[in-house]
């Protein structure tokens, strides 16, 4: 007889949520985690970066306090206090997750899981290392066998790790990933960020706010290339105005030491850049090292991700996979929903996951958020579309708030006027995008949004205003010339 009904390998936002839901469904559940609970999101991603970005936002706000009639003298920041605040938030939340697992009766096993069969794993002891600016987060390979665990079903939730840059000099001291950035004890005076997607753009915002001279090198023709083109262009313009050097259509070919670091760039911005730190944010790879997937018979694709169906089943019966390791959408909230779905399926419920309306948020300044199709994706899918933009500068609440940069863009079908995509750059974008996600989930139309009474004065009413513009009935901006 298996020791547990379900074994979850990995305690991130997918794994711990899946374990809790399965326990609530009456299953006996074990979870193996070699680090603190919460995974990358709580320890190395979502939460710590947002805590530090909030400090940067407060610093910038106080520096501009005179614009609001408030005068503050000798405004400065202390980076060690910024880091200490971040560490406190992370500890509180990870302890909270540990408490929730215990409260739901989940058995948590510390260590590294290695499959010996489809539903059997050996758990090895792993010693954590101090956070550094380069290299792995663990002191050594797992060697000491702690125990063997068997289960009727297994959920693989091991997440992802930062991708390395395959160029000369990528392993030099001072060349870091997003994980390594948390090991910095001072703000670098000059930093080159390789990759202008969400990770690179967020770190660029943070270090620029704290006074670094920041250069972003992005291979595509705009920042955040996964977003709608108008959003990426607007962010590049905003960054440039803030003093961030944006080199799009360019690649880093090598990194060398020359009284610091020297970065060779190819493309329209070819040349060399001097930096104290180079941060590589060029994507993520599945965290499957030394997991023993071959012994479990679990298939992976050419990139190492584990393919799953809409019920999160792998090619092996009784083995499921969720989160970043599936490569479906590398977002914490997607991992959580996959975890809930997998747990319900294992508990005997007929359910499946729907990726139609997956919101994404990037916590740059200004913020970015999106859901649904971009304009180019909608057209490529054969849709004839209506598009409309409404600027925050025309919104009363944005004026009083003191944040008027950016806009909302809605994409809708021409025939039925159904909402296909919502894209935001501006204040509180990450909060505002939920209306767009709900609209797509409920198959709402432009008229539905326009006819919904929104509170005034709020930032949220921008959804109604954008829908009115798309219908050709704008109230607070001038109509388009015919």
Image: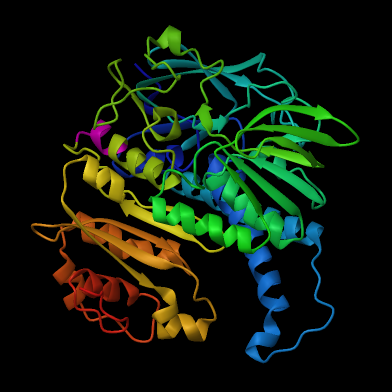
Which residue is at 74% across, 55% downward?
Answer: 83
Residue sitting nearer the eye, 310 or 216 = 216
Residue sitting nearer the eye, 371 or 155 = 371
Does residue 207 show up? yes
Which corner quadrant of the image does residue 143 belong to?
top right
> Please, what is the dominant secondary structure of the magenta stretch?
helix
Task: Point out the stretch of residues depicted in magenta.
Answer: 343-348
Residue sitting nearer the eye, 458 or 94 = 458
Give the image location of residue 245, x and y in percent: 66, 51
Residue sitting nearer the eye, 291 or 165 = 165
Which residue is at 49% across, 76% downward?
Answer: 404
Does residue 98 show up? no
Give the image location of residue 475, x and y in percent: 26, 84
With 93 as the anchor, is 17 left or right in this view? left
With 420 as the anchor, is 172 left or right in this view? right
Which residue is at 54% across, 50% downward?
Answer: 46
Furthest residue to the right?
Answer: 259
Give the image location of residue 378, x and y in percent: 24, 46
Image quarter (top left, top right, bottom left or bottom right) of the C terminus: bottom left
Furthest residue to the left?
Answer: 415
Magenta-drawn stretch contains 280: no
Give the image location of residue 445, x and y in percent: 15, 64
């Amino acid at each position: 007889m298996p020791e547990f009904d379900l074994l979850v390998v990995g305690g991130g936002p997918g794994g711990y949520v899946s374990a809790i839901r399965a326990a609530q469904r009456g299953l006996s559940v074990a979870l193996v985690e070699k680090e603190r609970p919460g995974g990358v999101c709580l320890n190395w991603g979502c939460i710590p970066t947002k805590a530090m970005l909030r400090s940067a936002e407060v610093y910038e706000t106080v520096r501009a306090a005179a614009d609001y009639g408030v005068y503050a003298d000798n405004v400065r920041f202390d980076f060690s206090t910024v880091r200490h605040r971040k560490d406190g938030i992370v500890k509180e939340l990870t302890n909270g997750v540990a408490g929730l697992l215990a409260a739901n009766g989940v058995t948590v096993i510390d260590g590294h899981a290695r499959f010996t069969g489809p539903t059997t794993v050996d758990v090895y002891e792993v010693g954590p290392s101090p956070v550094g600016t380069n290299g792995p987060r663990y002191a050594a390979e797992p060697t000491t066998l702690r125990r063997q665990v068997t289960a009727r079903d297994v959920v693989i939730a091991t997440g992802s790790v930062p991708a390395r840059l395959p160029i000369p000099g990528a392993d030099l001291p001072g060349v870091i990933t997003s994980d390594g950035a948390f090991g910095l004890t001072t703000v670098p005076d000059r930093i080159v960020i390789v990759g202008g997607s969400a990770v690179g753009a967020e770190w660029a915002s943070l270090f620029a706010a704290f006074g670094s001279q920041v250069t972003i090198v992005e291979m595509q023709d705009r920042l955040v290339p996964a977003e709608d083109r108008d959003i990426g262009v607007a962010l590049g313009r905003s960054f440039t105005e803030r003093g961030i050097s944006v080199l799009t259509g360019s690649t880093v070919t090598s990194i060398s030491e020359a009284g610091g670091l020297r970065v060779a760039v190819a493309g329209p911005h070819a040349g060399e850049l001097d930096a104290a730190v180079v941060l590589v944010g060029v994507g993520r790879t599945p965290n499957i090292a030394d997991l023993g997937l071959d012994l479990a018979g679990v298939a992976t694709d050419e990139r190492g991700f584990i393919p799953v169906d809409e019920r999160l089943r792998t090619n092996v019966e009784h083995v499921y996979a969720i989160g970043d390791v599936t490569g479906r959408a590398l977002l914490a909230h997607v991992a959580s929903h996959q975890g809930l779905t997998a747990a319900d399926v294992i508990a005997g419920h007929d359910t499946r996951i729907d990726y139609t309306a997956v919101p994404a948020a990037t916590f740059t300044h200004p913020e970015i958020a999106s859901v649904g199709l971009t304009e180019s994706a909608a057209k490529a899918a054969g849709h004839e579309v209506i598009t409309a933009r409404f600027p925050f500068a025309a919104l009363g609440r944005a004026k009083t708030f003191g944040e008027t940069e950016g806009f909302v863009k809605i994409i809708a079908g021409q025939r039925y006027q159904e909402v296909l995509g919502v894209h935001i750059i501006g204040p509180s974008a990450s909060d505002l995008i939920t209306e767009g996600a709900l609209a797509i989930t409920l198959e709402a139309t432009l008229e539905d949004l326009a006819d919904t009474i929104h509170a005034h004065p709020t930032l949220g009413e921008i959804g109604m205003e954008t829908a009115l513009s798309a219908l050709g009935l704008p109230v607070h901006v001038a109509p388009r010339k015919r």
